Image (cartoon, grey):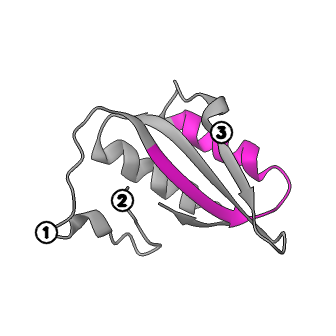
Amino acid sequence: MALINKQGVVAADAPDAPKIEFPCDNYVIKVVAMDVADIQATVIQHVRTHAPEFDESSIKKNVSSKGRFVSFSLRIRAESESQLARLHEDLMAVEAIKMVM
């Protein structure tokens, strides 16, 4: 999984980072967000924009112990680094989303 922060720094760019072979079936993405209304639908909408074949049933949702945050783990077919970068950029543009891995 590539970790990209808000400044666009990609941990996968490190020399010892494992390389992803594309296409990559079942590529896991994790999204951490504030638990606000419709956040799951928002995540799904953005993921479908970049991975139209995305299967909504692959989502695993966890709520933080205090209920302020929610995380989603989901699987897509990753076609390229640029696809993943665009998806990351779109998700991070959502104010409630705090992290995408």
Badge 1 crowding class, 10 Å Cα cut-off, few under 14, some 14 to 19, many 20 or more, is few
Q: Which residue is mark 1?
A: 15
User: Please, is residue 48 above or below residue 41 in the view?
Assistant: above
Which residue is rendered at x = 64% and y = 52% of the image?
A: 72
Is residue 61 on the magenta stretch? no
Q: In terms of depth relative to the viewer, which is nearer, 52 or 59?
A: 59
Q: Secondary structure at mark 3?
A: helix
Specify the amino acid type for callout 2: Ala
Is residue 40 on the magenta stretch? yes
> In the image, is 63 to the left or to the right of 44?
right
Badge 2 crowding class, 10 Å Cα cut-off, few under 14, some 14 to 19, many 20 or more, is many
Task: Identify the disc placed on residue 2.
Answer: 2
Between marks 2 and 3, how big is the CA–CA gap? 21 Å
In the displayed orientation, state which residue is furthest to the top: 53
Q: In terms of depth relative to the viewer, which is nearer, 56 or 44?
A: 56
In the displayed orientation, state which residue is furthest to the front: 65
Q: Residue 6, position in %: x, y? A: 47, 73
Specify the amino acid type for callout 3: Gln
Q: Residue 88, position in %: x, y? A: 47, 55
Which residue is rendered at x = 25% and y = 36% of the image?
A: 22
- The segment highlighted magenta reads 28-49
Q: Residue 94, position in %: x, y? A: 64, 60
Q: Which residue is mark 3?
A: 45
